[in-house]
Image (cartoon, rainbow, N blue to C red):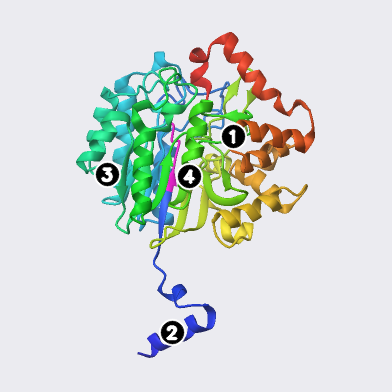
Amino acid sequence: MEVWIHHVGVCLLFMTSWDGCLADEGWFWHVTDFHYDFSYSGLDLSCNDVVTNHGKYGNYWCDSPWRLINSSVEAMKKFKLDVDFILWTGDSVLHTRDEHLSLDINDGILTNITTLLKQAFGSTRIYATFGNHDYFPDAQFPPNNNELYNRTLENWLTWISDEREKENFLKGAYYSAVTDHGIRIVALNTNLYYTSDKLTANLTDPAGQFAWLETLLTNSSVNNEKVLITGHVPPGVVDTMSKPWMYQHFNKKMNDIILKYSDVIIGLHFGHEHMDNFRLYRKSDVPVAVLFSAPSVTPWRYKIPTQTGAAHNPAIRLVHYDRQTGRQINMITYYMDLPASNALGEPQWAEEYNAIRDYAIADLSPTSINTLIDRIDVSGSPEFDKYWKWRVVNVPDELLEECNEACNANIVCQFRHVDQASYDACVLKAIGNSTCLVPSLAWVLVFALLGLASYAWTTI
């Protein structure tokens, strides 16, 4: 009895209401872009440079050896085993040419990682989605049923058990589910909208996913459901290319849906970018939604004719949320120090940052993230330095690249503008008519001359 009275006293002292004492809060993991390279330290099929030192846990130029993938799942167990669910946003297959892959190989990789996660987390529900590299041929997701969807559903039946959702998955690899605490998870196949997918470029609604999504969100609004949306390829403009990952008409449609239903969408979590990144959605200049792109497990750096990606460490993400409202409270990102792990022969996982503590924000709400963006936007601010370091998951200082005026403008504008026109206008306003927009033009020219299909294996 005395203990209970003491607890009540503490709550009265430190909480502004009973909500703080009675809050029902939980955690979920977000893990993405494992990219398993079964040829690491052999043929090195994924490596974008000559590798003479094959570290035990990987190399910045290559995709993940199995030891790294296993270690990342073990780290998830170590840091937080008791979670409500896991988001797994795809790209388990390595970056390489189609000639080195097949339906059986891709399916085998997906099966192995599915098994690893099931063994580690038992009955914990995992909401999994495909990445663009998971399909064979690479990124060419068809807007209809196929053998990979059929095989994968068999592996994911413990997570996708509703008969209607099975039909949706077989139709287009998308589905929804309700968590034990009443949050609706909407798992999208946004690979259908990716510019590398040549089978959907001229369609308006591949696999009927947009129509399904709008109907679902309308019903969720009527039923007072809170919705968390997850998938692989995120909408918005990516600063490294100065253009969206998606075809423009698909990017617009996704953005329109997010804005229209922002009152029921409590979270947006995607992968694909390999960086720690986010975007803010505004309606009438009021922040209404935040999209988070989690950093990858793979340390792989891309290399294309016009650009080379930054080095980055492997990472996993833990999200704290309110089970009753779905409000995203905090996130903690953990990382493997790849050079130290290779040098010591043991995985060196540690907390990289705690968003509330280290960014000094109240929570992950649109209002708080808007405040953070305003602080990042100040030239030379501590917040920008933190973001720039954590964006590439705490790589050694000697590998941390400089960010000039154009770079800074691209980053801040992609935070605030999710469509091409407003993004371009933002960049031009920030630094004038400069070379910051050249990367976008360069990509267009390169892919027009060389053909995107033959170079798709080098893209993220």
Q: Which mark is residue 8?
A: 2
Q: Position of residue 211 (x, y in %)?
A: 36, 35
Circle nearer the N terminus (4, 3): 3
Q: Is residue 244 magenta?
A: no
Choose mark 1 or mark 2, whichever is in front.
Answer: 1
Choose mark 4 or mark 3, whichever is in front.
Answer: 4
Q: Which residue is mark 1?
A: 419
The span picked out in magenta is 30-35
Estimate how packed mark 4 is, as few (under 14), some (14 to 19) or many (20 or more) residues with alpha carbons within 10 Å.
Answer: some
Choose mark 1 or mark 3, whichever is in front.
Answer: 1
Circle nearer the N terminus (1, 3): 3
Taking the image as shown, residue 169 lies to the left or right of residue 86, namely left
Circle nearer the N terminus (1, 2): 2
Q: Which residue is mark 4?
A: 260
Choose mark 4 or mark 1, whichever is in front.
Answer: 4
Count the marks: how many?
4
State the residue at coordinates (35%, 21%).
142
